[in-house]
Image (cartoon, rainbow, N blue to C red):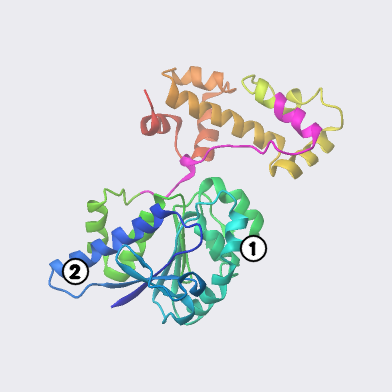
């Protein structure tokens, strides 16, 4: 029987814990229905000081302290519900040695969404591939520069370490692991039970461009305001920032230092975000969407949109149209 550990971190997202339990309990039910022993022995763990002398249970499971936990085969780290990821990691720092020890003993580690930050903090991901929620990728890359972040991926697996994107991507992570541990037949049965699209391998189209505004660089603020006010114009970035005092080189340097991207990249992301909204919130023709988001060349618009979003403008509208 496969020993499956679920770490109940501080500030864990209940939805990710519930999803993990639901999926693996369903697998066990499949096995029992087929007159087999359950595939997974599910164990829940947390810090000993939380349990103390109390017999704490969660959904029928007795929660065990990590300091006396036996070796696991597979350990899940759920997503965090805290908006302050750095603070959430600090609150869970005591779990890092345990995760390192379990991994060194042969356990595989899998994390859901922002749970990747705790896995990253162990140092085990250094030099390896990983992903996380699309809107947390910039912060993750800054915190763990030696990790090979693949922000467009739904699931990654590298040397026994697994990560997944936004919360629904956890199902794709679990399907991936089920294929490994139980075979494709069980993975397909779970996919059908939970109505999971097994072919999704990108999460780029779920991202939202939310540029940093809370900084004290007035020059960069002026550039951001100019772009926000006139991105629909088909002019160049030079035209949009020509009234800002300072050299083009100095503006570009300070802009990237503050926002993490160049002014040109910022303009393109602003235009694409505007196009995304027009595609799903209006019934404008594609030519109108293109022009109203600052593009004049249909071929260039489609190319940039697909590169940025991960699908064509038409495909995006078909998938997310709200009309």
Give yes or no for residue 116 being in the magenta stretch: no
Query: What kind of element bears circle 2?
Result: helix
Residue at image coords 26%, 48%: 195
Residue at image coords 42%, 81%: 71
Residue 261, by quadrant, is top right
Cα separation between marks 1 and 2: 41 Å
Q: Point out the frontmost of discs 1 and 2.
A: 2
Q: Report the front residue among 282 and 295.
A: 282
Q: Report the front residue among 100 and 316.
A: 100
Q: Indicate the position of residue 160 as horizontal and vertical percent values.
A: 46, 71
Q: Is residue 66 visible?
A: yes
Q: Quadrant of the N terminus?
A: bottom left
Residue 187, by quadrant, is bottom left
Query: What kind of element bears circle 1?
Result: loop
**Looking at the image, residue 157 lies above or below residue 79:** below
| Left or right position of 69 against 97 | left
* Extent of the magenta region: 200-226
User: Which label is found at residue 146?
Assistant: 1
**Looking at the image, residue 227 lies above or below residue 134:** above
Q: Which residue is mark 2?
A: 31
Q: Indicate the position of residue 260 as horizontal and vertical percent values.
A: 69, 44
């Amino acid at each position: 029987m496969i020993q499956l550990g679920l770490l109940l971190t501080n500030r864990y997202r209940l939805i990710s814990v519930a999803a993990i339990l639901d999926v693996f309990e369903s697998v066990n039910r499949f096995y029992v229905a087929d007159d087999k022993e359950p595939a997974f022995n599910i164990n829940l763990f947390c810090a000993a000081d939380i349990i103390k002398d109390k017999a704490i249970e969660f959904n029928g499971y007795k929660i065990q302290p990590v300091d006396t936990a036996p070796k696991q085969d597979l350990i899940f780290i759920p997503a965090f519900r805290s908006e302050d990821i750095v603070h959430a990691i600090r609150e869970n720092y005591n779990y890092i040695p345990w995760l390192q020890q379990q991994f060194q003993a042969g356990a595989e580690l899998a994390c859901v969404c922002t749970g990747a930050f705790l896995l990253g903090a162990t140092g085990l991901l250094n030099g390896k591939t990983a992903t996380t929620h699309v809107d947390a990728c910039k912060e993750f890359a800054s915190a763990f520069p030696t990790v090979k972040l693949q922000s467009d991926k739904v699931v990654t697996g590298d040397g026994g370490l697994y990560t997944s994107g936004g919360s629904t991507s956890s199902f794709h992570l679990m399907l991936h692991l089920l294929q490994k541990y139980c075979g494709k037949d069980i993975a397909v049965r779970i996919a059908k039970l939970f109505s999971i699209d097994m072919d999704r391998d990108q999460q780029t189209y779920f991202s939202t461009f939310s540029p940093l505004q809370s900084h004290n660089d007035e020059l960069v603020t002026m550039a951001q305001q100019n772009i926000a006010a006139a991105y629909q114009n088909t002019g160049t970035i030079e035209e949009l920032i020509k009234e800002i005092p300072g050299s083009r080189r100095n503006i570009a340097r300070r802009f990237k230092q503050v926002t993490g991207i160049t002014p040109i990249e910022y303009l393109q992301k602003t235009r694409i975000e505007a196009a995304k909204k027009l595609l799903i919130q209006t019934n404008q023709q594609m030519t109108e969407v293109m022009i109203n988001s600052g593009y004049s060349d249909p071929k260039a618009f489609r190319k940039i949109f697909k590169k940025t979003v991960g699908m064509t403008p038409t495909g995006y509208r078909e998938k997310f149209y709200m009309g």
